[in-house]
Image: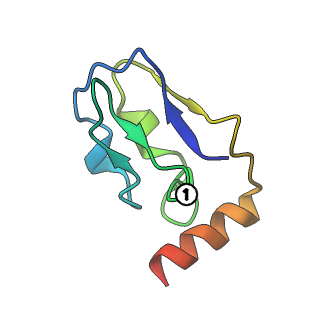
Amino acid sequence: MALMITQDCTACDACKPACPNEAIAEGSPMYVIDALRCTECVGAEDDPQCALMCPADCIVPNPDFVESREELMAKYESLHG
């Protein structure tokens, strides 16, 4: 499942450099996660790095993009293959 950033985002920029897939971009007024690039760090890390770095605790699963671990790994491989 891809992640998303909620309205609680403070636009602090802690999440963006932590993303191995460059799925996070600065939006207005908050940052956004490209669900087509987000793998929840499957393939790169054990845990979603953006969520670990977020001081506002505003990164949650995106209910519109439910994916298995295998699908997330395939997405990661297609992005970095």
Residue under pointer 1: 36
Q: Which residue sits furthest bottom?
A: 81
Q: Which residue sits furthest front?
A: 28
Dividing the picture into quadrants, the one containing residue 73 is bottom right
Residue at the image position 70 percent from the left and 34 percent from the top: 63
Dividing the picture into quadrants, the one containing residue 55 is top left
Residue at the image position 55 percent from the left and 69 percent from the top: 76
In front: 29, or 20? 29
The structure's colour scheme is rainbow
Image vertical order of residue 52 relative to residue 20, above or below: above
Q: Is residue 46 left or right of residue 18?
A: right
Q: Which residue sits furthest left?
A: 12
Crowd around label 1: few <14 · some 14–19 · many ≥20 (10 Å):
few
Q: Is residue 19 left or right of residue 78?
A: left
Q: Which residue sits furthest top?
A: 8
Image vertical order of residue 22 relative to residue 56, above or below: below
Q: Amino acid at mark 1?
A: Leu
Image vertical order of residue 34 relative to residue 10, above or below: below
For mark 1, give the secondary structure.
loop
Residue at the image position 55 percent from the left and 66 percent from the top: 43
Q: Is residue 38 left or right of residue 7?
A: right
In front: 3, or 42? 3
x then y, percent, for residue 58: 45, 22
x then y, percent, for residue 46: 55, 53
Residue at the image position 58 percent from the left and 59 percent from the top: 42
x then y, percent, for residue 40: 56, 50
